[in-house]
Amino acid sequence: VHCLFSRTRLEGCGTLLILDQNESGLRLFRSFDWNDGLFDVTWSENNEHILVTCSGDGSLQLWDTAKAAGPLQVYKEHTQEVYSVDWSQTRGEQLVVSGSWDQTVKLWDPTVGKSLCTFRGHESVIYSTIWSPHIPGCFASASGDQTLRIWDVKSTGVRIVVPAHQAEILSCDWCKYNENLLVTGAVDCSLRGWDLRNIRQPVFELLGHTYAIRRVKFSPFHASVLASCSYDFTVRFWNFSKPDPLLETVEHHTEFTCGLDLSLQSPTQVADCAWDETIKIYDPVCLTMPA
């Protein structure tokens, strides 16, 4: 059974939906309510039933999908909306990082009731916090201050500051095949790739979206393939190694597309969601064809 998630915001309240996928489609497995909008969700890397969400009231919530009631724990330290949460992917550490509109990033051990440390340096709201899949204790953050920043939990100061766009950066992600490569997506409608060994210029720029890019994700299966979703209602698939990098544009939503992920089990499966209150799970043509 593949469990998938969604979050919605209705009349100021949030809902976490756990969906089962099988041959006949999607089935609602569990539903949890929270008293404010839920902005992001991340699965535990060591327990298939545990996940963490973050919300507009400044809190993080720990849920167990095997239990009908919840949450198991609430972590309330951020003073404004928490827009991003991510569970570490490297072995030997079970840490969660959260990014907030209070301009701070906080590090959490879910077994401890309070944050381990707070990272300061961004000069505007933080939209995205993503762990490196390669380097233990290393994560990236993207902010309305137009920078991408790289942090190390061993030293609470920032390691690298990348002035990545001349616009708010809403999303970032690490390449799964290159520990030095990240991508940013911004309000300027562009995606830019950054090699951390030389940050003076982007190593690629992808143009085509017509409104702000809300989320970007590298493929777990293809080293140079990524996907992005935008307030232009589209999801676009790219191969930045090709002269004509745009592989496909998917237009199946009637409102802003705001969530996007690529399956870790299937090389072709994608899930996205939008303000039209629908979740789409599909296999884009460009991922079903040989590269």
Image (spheres, rainbow, N blue to C red):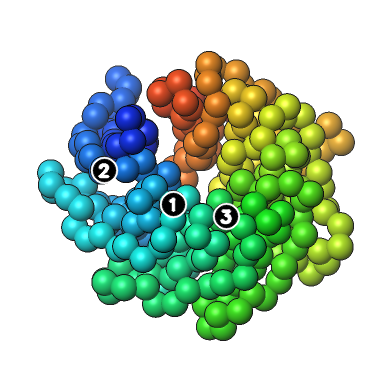
Residue indicated by mark 1: 81
User: In the image, residue 207 lies at what x, y percent?
Assistant: 79, 34
Label 1 or label 3, whichever comes before in sequence order: 1
Name the mark on residue 125.
3
Instruction: Using the image as rendered, state which of residue 12 and residue 278 is in the foreground.
Output: 12
Label 1 or label 2, whichever comes before in sequence order: 2
Instruction: Using the image as rendered, state which of residue 139 and residue 107 is in the foreground.
Output: 107
Q: Amino acid at mark 1?
A: Glu
Q: Which residue appears at 52% of the width and 77% of the height?
A: 153
**Real-space Cα separation, disc 1 to disc 2, in angstroms:** 13 Å
Residue indicated by mark 2: 35
Residue 56 position (above or below residue 197):
above
**Real-space Cα separation, disc 2 to disc 3, in angstroms:** 22 Å
Mark 2 crowdedness (10 Å alpha carbons): few <14, some 14-19, many ≥20: some
Is residue 37 rendered to the left or right of residue 124?
A: left
Q: Looking at the rendering, in which quadrant would you find the C terminus?
A: top right
